[in-house]
């Protein structure tokens, strides 16, 4: 099994006619994802390599039965694109776009919570999600992920960082460990999906035996995840926190990755996770080795 | 993006928040002219630097007449405050203060709601108040969809136990401050102190504003952008559109992805080295971006060796390798380079790099080994 998306997920791409949306939408289709539609109000009736374009998400949903959307719309349009997807009837929205204003994120996060509680938003500013062998939505290179194997111990991954997510997928593949689902939640201040949302589902997913969690400095999401792991998880968790040596007050590329006033430090996060019996690696390689050790001993 | 105090006050004034009459200048004669135009002594001469502790450093002075303005302006302009050179001063009418309060809005990332903080104990470090007397800060959490209503603002002011005389003025300012925070696309707006004058008016005596760079597309922020304090290296990288943060060490870092770049800093530190910078070249890693990144690193005199750490995802190893080779042909590099290339088609990429390897261009299979090599090279020079 997998979490959030599987072989039955049908995806509409908002921004499929743009260069990024087209490039990744077609790559995702090549991977095997059911890319059923794209949207562009000015190009309804046209197609992108056989994928039909509709004027709106609602039109795409009623014509194709799409139940997920992937957003490649430039940042200024993201707020309305997210709401269009929710109103259009999809239940899973993946927003790849980076550079979305925090005020917009805070607004649509809370609007979705209140008016569309059944909708799960992933991102913005995230690499997307892949359930290897079933569905790949976003910008992850599908071939670096190993499909889960029935009867063996497979791992779930949840990460705030893009490249480190790929690194984790790749190291597990080299060790011949399958991945059920890899979720990139993104590094923005108001992520639609949290570590806890993913941990909860991995705990409930019978195919997932252990979870790899990759965090970053800034915010308190890792500390909250540690509390959840302590109280509600039976499966082993391995973690790595990037930015252990980042100086205070410096923004490190992601809107989220900033340490201020001694809060959100890597040390505090690692301590909280260790206290929740999470094995914490000092670097990505060590985290990979810890995961291998755990899986081999299950 | 942090604003200077004078920019913060102009930003607040744009939302109707009462601030002291004043102006910003960068030379002594202009300072005197502004004071004379205000015409109501004493005036305050304030150093404009983005660092705390200006007052203690002698960067804030009261002037009773034009001669004193001249004297203080002369002393403060060019002054060094914790490594920041004062290039501008703000001259404003001095205010009579009956009481000092604190007010701010920011995002509570854990609750995913806006957080408003209001305290009757202003004028001091709010962190100190939060530590010693947390009940002295009245907090409210605001759902962005609802916004801040006047009724809620009034209850909040009452909960903070400000002087009842300040209630109406405080409610008015808080509603405007919330608009400045939301419509102005700020990550933080803070007034400390928010003052009650003996005449009963409420007034923002200081302004701290951090704007959300992601929202620049819907604002006119060119002037703020132009006055940002950046070191030379950061300015050069910014001009090339690179995500760069200058640090104090000797190992230049180039990586693709913010997480991997941070992770690279960690590993370099873990093997006893010290990074000269954080530099994220993003996913593509083509020759243009790589050449630009190498130029920025190469111009940093403190760099003794360079670590290129690339993990190929969608961008394949051979594209990355060709990008590196082409960039090296374009830029004359002064320091030895260690490359770690992994991920998609890493072997093909390494094969492309192989013929170019030398003492000054090495390749290592893992992050850890590459870090050890690059740190040893930095120490040997």
Image (cartoon, coloured by chain):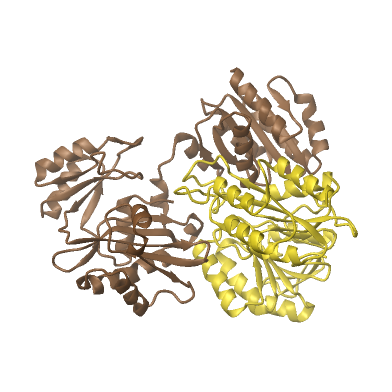
Chain colours: A yellow, B brown
Q: Residue at x 47, y 47 (%)?
A: A262
**Would residue B314 be visible to someone looking at this image?**
no
Q: Residue furthest right?
A: A151
**Would residue B114 be visible to someone looking at this image?**
yes
Q: Position of residue A24 (x, y in %)?
A: 74, 58
Q: How many marks?
A: 0
Q: Quadrant of the C terminus of chain B?
A: top right
Measured along the vertical axis of the image, is residue A59 above or below residue B317? below
Q: Please identify the quarter of the rendering in which residue A206 is found.
A: bottom right
- Left of A254 or right of it: where is B83? left
Q: Residue at x 48, y 72 (%)?
A: B144
Q: Position of residue B258 (x, y in %)?
A: 61, 46
Q: Residue furthest bottom?
A: A62
Measured along the vertical axis of the image, is residue B236 above or below residue A29? above
Q: Please identify the quarter of the rendering in which residue B178 is found.
A: bottom left
- Left of B111 or right of it: where is A73? right
Q: Residue at x 21, y 58 (%)?
A: B20
Q: Position of residue B252 (x, y in %)?
A: 58, 31
Q: Please identify the quarter of the rendering in which residue A45 is found.
A: bottom right
Q: Residue at x 12, y 41 (%)?
A: B68
Q: Position of residue B59 (x, y in %)?
A: 24, 41
Q: Nearer the viewer, residue B152 or B253?
A: B152
Measured along the vertical axis of the image, is residue A267 above or below residue B167? above
């Amino acid at each position: 099994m997998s979490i959030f998306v599987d072989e039955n997920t049908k995806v509409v791409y908002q921004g499929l006619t743009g260069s990024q949306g087209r490039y990744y939408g077609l790559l995702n289709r090549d991977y095997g994802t059911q890319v059923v539609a794209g949207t562009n109000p000015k190009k309804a009736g046209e197609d992108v390599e056989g994928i039909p374009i509709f004027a709106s998400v609602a039109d795409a949903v009623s014509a194709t039965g799409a139940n997920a959307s992937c957003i490649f719309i430039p940042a200024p349009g993201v707020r309305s694109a997210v709401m269009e997807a929710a109103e259009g009837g999809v239940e899973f929205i993946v927003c790849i776009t980076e550079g979305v204003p925090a005020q917009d994120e805070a607004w649509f996060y809370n609007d979705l919570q209140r008016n569309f509680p059944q909708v799960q938003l992933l991102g913005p500013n995230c690499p997307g999600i892949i359930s290897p062998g079933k569905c790949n939505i976003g910008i992850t290179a599908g071939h670096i992920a190993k499909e889960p194997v029935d009867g063996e111990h497979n791992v779930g991954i949840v990460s705030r960082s893009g490249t480190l997510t790929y690194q984790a997928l790749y190291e597990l593949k080299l060790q011949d460990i399958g991945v059920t689902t890899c979720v990139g939640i993104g590094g923005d201040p108001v992520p639609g999906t949290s570590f806890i949302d993913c941990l909860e589902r991995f705990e409930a997913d019978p195919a997932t035996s252990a979870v790899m969690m990759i965090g970053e400095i800034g915010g308190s999401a890792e500390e909250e995840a540690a509390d959840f792991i302590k109280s509600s998880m039976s499966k082993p968790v391995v973690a790595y926190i990037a930015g252990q040596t980042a100086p205070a007050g410096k923004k490190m590329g992601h809107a989220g990755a900033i340490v201020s006033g001694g809060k959100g430090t890597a040390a505090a996060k690692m301590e909280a996770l260790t206290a929740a019996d999470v094995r914490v690696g000092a670097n990505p390689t060590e985290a990979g080795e810890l995961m291998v050790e755990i899986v081999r001993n299950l | 993006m942090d604003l200077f105090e004078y920019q913060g006050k102009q930003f607040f004034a744009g939302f109707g928040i009462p601030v002291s009459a004043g102006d910003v200048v960068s030379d002594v004669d202009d300072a005197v002219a502004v004071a004379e135009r205000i015409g109501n002594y004493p005036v305050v001469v304030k150093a404009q630097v983005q660092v705390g502790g200006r007052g203690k450093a002698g960067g804030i002075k009261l002037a009773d007449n034009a001669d004193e303005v001249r004297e203080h302006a002369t002393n403060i302009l060019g002054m060094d405050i914790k490594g920041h050179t004062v290039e501008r001063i703000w001259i404003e009418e001095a205010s009579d203060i009956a009481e000092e309060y604190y007010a701010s809005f920011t995002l509570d990332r854990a609750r995913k709601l806006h957080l408003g903080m209001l305290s009757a104990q202003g004028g001091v470090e709010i962190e100190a108040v939060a530590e010693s007397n947390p009940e002295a800060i009245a907090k409210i959490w605001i759902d962005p969809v609802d916004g801040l209503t006047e009724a809620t603002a009034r209850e909040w002011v009452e909960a903070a136990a400000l002087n009842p005389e300040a209630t109406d003025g405080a409610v008015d300012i808080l509603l405007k401050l919330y608009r400045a925070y939301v419509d102005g696309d700020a990550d933080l707006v803070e007034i400390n102190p928010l003052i009650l004058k003996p005449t009963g008016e409420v007034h923002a005596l200081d302004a701290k504003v951090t704007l959300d760079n992601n929202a620049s597309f819907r604002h006119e922020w060119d002037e703020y952008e132009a006055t940002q304090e950046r070191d030379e290296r950061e300015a050069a990288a910014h001009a090339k559109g690179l995500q760069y943060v200058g640090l104090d060490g000797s190992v230049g870092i180039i990586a693709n992805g913010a997480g991997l770049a941070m992770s690279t800093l960690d590993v370099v530190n873990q093997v006893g080295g010290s990074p000269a910078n954080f530099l994220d070249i993003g996913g593509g890693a083509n020759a243009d971006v790589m050449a630009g990144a190498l130029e920025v690193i190469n111009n940093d005199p403190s760099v003794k060796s360079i670590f290129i750490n690339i993990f190929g995802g969608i961008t394949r190893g051979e594209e990355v390798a060709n990008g590196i080779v082409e960039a090296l042909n374009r830029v004359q590099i002064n320091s030895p380079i260690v490359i770690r290339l992994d991920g998609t088609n890493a072997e093909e990429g390494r094969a492309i790099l192989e013929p170019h390897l030398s003492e000054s261009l090495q390749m290592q299979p893992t992050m850890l080994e590459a870090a050890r090599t690059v740190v040893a090279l930095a120490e040997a020079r």
